[in-house]
Amino acid sequence: MQLLDRYLLIRVLQPFLYCVVGFVSIWLVFDLSENAPAFIENKAPLSLLVEFYLLRAPEIILMSLPIGFLLALLYALTQMSRRNEIISMLCAGRSVVRLLMPIFLFGLVLTGISTALNYSLAPHAGAVKKEILTDLRKKGDVNRKAIRGHLYRNREDRRFWFISRLNPSIERFAWVQIIQEDAEGDLQRNYYAEEANYDHDSKTWLLSNGKVVDFNEKGDIKEQQWFQKLQLRNFSETPWRISSSVLEANFLSVPELRDYLKYNSHFTAARLAPYRTQLDYRWALPWGCFVAVLIAGPLGIVYSRRGIMGSITMAIGLFFLLILGSSLFLALGKGDRIGAILAAWGPVVFFGGVGAFMIWMRTTNREVPNILS
């Protein structure tokens, strides 16, 4: 990396850090004004409040990175243009692409950081907010947070689960009925239990206070046996797999979305559409940082003071359209109106192409038209 590359990165990095820290601080102030009363009224410990915001931080950082990077680029490049530093670099023999090369590399680094955050931490942050606030308002009453009357079907192993009361957060099932079918689809065995718990270490289900009923080929009861404790070691179901069908796609990580689509592949396309769209969106969203370079780079380099405000307005307007388009396409994808890949990647690819075209115009010494004027 040469001296001019380091100089440009330093000029961009300082306002970028100010923007990100400023966005996080503003969010924290507004969020405290909204949620702090719930912690105070329920006399929650300070450690829970700190944990609440530490777990939610990845979500707001992920949202702040692309817009903070865009504003930092516009500020740094327009300031350098005002002082004729950009023109001096170009006159020294550097092309526009070579001038922006360290910014492209930094954009890729931010894309990698955003991908890591969006893989698991940021999606779970929304679930953490919902779970902790619900727990505070209901004061730890697990029964009031439970899902009632949940039905799950395991097509591979030909089993039906009916759970009268299910609480995913503590993985405790109450009043459980398990129906086992044979290869021909005939009733083979029923399990009834007052409670079902899962041991992750041994991958074993423990049923309490129930009975096992076996059926013959005609469907009549052949034998029934009562039990206080019964271990089921050969069941492939896990509490997450059973309860995943009622989990929201927005709050699931990439592995959880993959598992959901794998274990619930028998659902209709419309029901799976939100999960397919979110899975592709997990990879598409971070590229907003790189699109910010493609948009702000050519528009931040101006050759006259008169065109600075117009370029800034156009850059911010294009990025706003990117966010608006992503929200619209995401809604269409979740509603199964368009394909998941198009819903997730369409706006990113389109505005990335617009940015690449504007960079080409700058490299060929053409003026970028202000489409928002």
Image: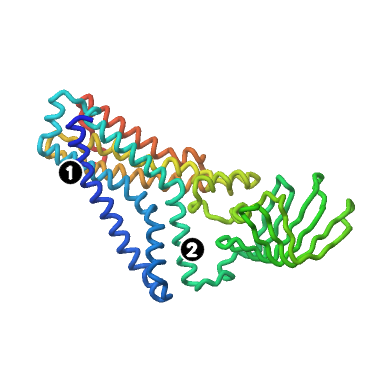
Q: In this view, does 71 lie above or below 362?
A: below
Is 24 placed left or right of 83 in the picture? right
Residue 367 image-quadrant placement:
top left
Where residue 361 appears, as percent x and y from the top left, is: 25, 28
* Nearer to us in this view, 328 or 359: 359
Q: Judging from the image, what secondary structure is the residue with disc 2 in?
A: helix
Q: Residue 46 vs residue 178: left or right? A: left
As measured in the structure, the alpha-carbon distance from the residue carrying label 1 to the one carrying label 2 is 45 Å
For the C terminus, the image quarter is top left
Q: Mark 2 points at which residue?
A: 131
Label 1: element kind: helix
Q: Which amino acid does label 1 sit on?
A: Met
User: Which is more N-terminal, label 2 or label 1?
Assistant: 2
Residue 354 badge: none
Is 172 placed left or right of 137 in the picture?
right
How packed mark 1 is, by other alpha carbons closer than 10 Å (few <14, some 14-19, many 20 or more), is some
Kindly identify which residue carries mark 1: 309
Q: Residue sitting at 23 percent across and 26 percent down?
A: 363
Foreground mark, 1 or 2?
Answer: 2
Q: How many marks?
A: 2
Residue drawn at point x = 59 percent, y = 70 percent: 143
Which of the two residues, 109 or 297, is positioned nearer the viewer here? 109
